[in-house]
Image (spheres, helix red, strand yellow):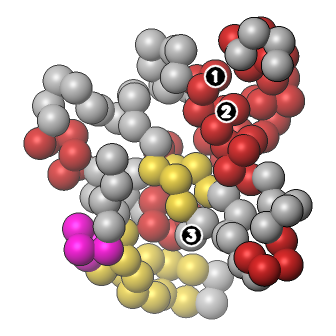
Amino acid sequence: FVLDKKAMFTIKSQFKNGEKKHYVKPLQLIWRKFNGIYHEDNTIHIDDLSRNFALNAPQGLTIKPYKHAYKNKHTDTELLHLTHYLTLIGKLDSFKGLDHNKWKEYLEKHGNQFANFQGGN
């Protein structure tokens, strides 16, 4: 499911150019509401702004922003590759130990499993 901006609140974080206030999405809301179903070992927060992961860095997966749709709609494959990654790790019992910052490397290493999972297509 999706947590939209309504569930976000601001915090202060230290950045290279100083301290800034920014919004974060608290995954603890999900974990409390769906206790026993969702937790830190089976939840991923996908966003194009890594600062939104400040409260839950291990669950954060940064993707490229989708910009200039009129120009890039035929060549942007970020969500296609992300789908492959999520399909692969969805078979795991836990995401603990996965580094979502290296999701593309994981996909390169295990991508043939996705092809096998899809029946070779």
Q: Which residue is mark 2?
A: 85
Q: Position of residue 32 (x, y in %)?
A: 13, 41
Q: Amino acid at mark 2?
A: Tyr
Instruction: Indicate which disc, 1 or 3, sits on the residue closer to the N terminus.
Output: 3
Per the rendering, the mark at residue 88 is 1
102 vs 98: above or below: below
Name the quadrant containing residue 102: top right
- Structural crowding at the residue carrying mark 2, measured as other residues with C-alpha within 10 Å and reported as few (<14), some (14–19) or many (≥20): many
Instruction: Indicate which disc, 2 or 3, sits on the residue closer to the N terminus.
Output: 3
Is residue 105 rendered to the left or right of residue 6?
Answer: right
Is any part of residue 110 visible from this angle?
A: no
Q: Amino acid at mark 1?
A: Leu
| Contact, mark 1 vs mark 2 (Cβ under 8 Å) | yes
Q: What residue range appears in magenta?
A: 5-9
Q: Position of residue 89 (x, y in %)?
A: 58, 24
CA gap, disc 1 and disc 3: 23 Å
Camera-nearest residue between 85 and 94 = 85
Camera-nearest residue between 106 and 112 = 112
Query: Of helix, strand and loop, which one carries label 3?
Result: loop
Query: Of helix, strand and loop, which one carries label 1?
Result: helix
Query: Of helix, strand and loop, which one carries label 2?
Result: helix
29 vs 16: above or below: above
